[in-house]
Image (spheres, helix red, strand yellow):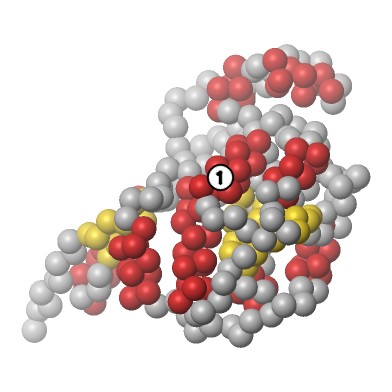
Amino acid sequence: MFQHGALGGATPDEYHHGSPRMEAYLRRYGIPKRRWDSPDPDGESPEAEWGFEPTLRDDIERVARQRGWRVRRVIFEQPEDMSPFVAELYRWWYRERAIDCRRLIVESFILLEPWWTLRSGAAPFWMVFNKQPSLDALERYLDASRPFDEIALTLFSHGVDSVGLPPIERWAMALHRARRDGRFVGVDRAAFPRDFAVFLRFHRDLAAVAERFPMPAALSLRELEIFLRTTGGQFPVQWVDLNVARERRSA
């Protein structure tokens, strides 16, 4: 399989057929083309980083039948579909621990810090990349959720002013949604998107958070079930129990 580009600002149609903004991107970097020359597609497959390989399901179901285990599929169309679900799950989990979660950490691509997220009592919102669709997803979540007192945002830097990249000022507008304090974490606003030191500063800045909470025990499946019952169909994520009968073992 040949994968042209990746999930982010440009659409699949733009990769294959071009567009005014794709043409402007190529011109900006001195490439004497109006669009990319790539093979005509003969099918469509999930992107390498996010897709599910169906043959894995057969192995999972086989082992579950042998062991008498329960199998549940988590189904969603786009990687970011899980982000509002996870953020609200964390807020609910904190409330169960008598912690009023008023802090949001917005993570970007591989810039993730699950340990410090829990240690600082924050809810995580993960973005696929640093492009407009991810900014749109973040703003939709902020529109629908209870307000946060603090919003901390990091941005993955990939080095080019590529298609669909919002300017840093546009990202800063999302931070204005915080009731008390909105700030970038590890981001050099003047250097973005060529801010490669962000990969070190992001972790250092999060570790400097003064307010800290005890690390919880692992979230149990029973607690997850309770959250799923309370939220119903609020999120674009399906949880499907598979009827996997136990195989009879020969004596």
Q: Quadrant of residue 204?
A: bottom right
Give the side of residue 197 with respect to residue 57, left or right. right
**Residue matched to label 1:** 143
Residue beneath the point at 50% across and 84% down = 217
Could you say where residue 23 lies in the image, as x and y percent from the top left? 73, 17
Badge 1 crowding class, 10 Å Cα cut-off, few under 14, some 14 to 19, many 20 or more, is few
Could you say where residue 151 lies in the image, as x and y percent from the top left? 69, 57
Give the answer, above or below, for where 38 lies relative to 226: above
Q: Quadrant of residue 115?
A: bottom right
Q: Is residue 107 visible?
A: no
Give the answer, above or below, for where 36 lies relative to 119: above
Give the side of residue 131 with respect to residue 84, left or right. right
Residue beneath the point at 38% across and 69% down = 224
- Residue placed farthest to the front in the image? 179
Could you say where residue 1 lies in the image, as x and y percent from the top left? 51, 37
Q: Which part of the image, by quadrant, shows the C terminus?
A: bottom left
Residue beneath the point at 65% across and 36% down = 132
Residue in the foreground of this view, choosing between 231 and 205: 231
Give the side of residue 27 with respect to residue 133, left or right. right
Q: Is residue 23 visible?
A: yes
Give the answer, above or below, for where 243 lies relative to 159: below
- Residue placed farthest to the right in the image? 190
Residue beneath the point at 59% across and 64% down = 123
Residue in the foreground of this view, choosing between 19 and 16: 19
Could you say where residue 144 lies in the image, as x and y percent from the top left? 51, 47
In the rendered picture of this protein, how many numbered marks are placed on residues?
1
Q: What amino acid does circle 1 point to?
A: Asp
Which SS class for mark 1? helix
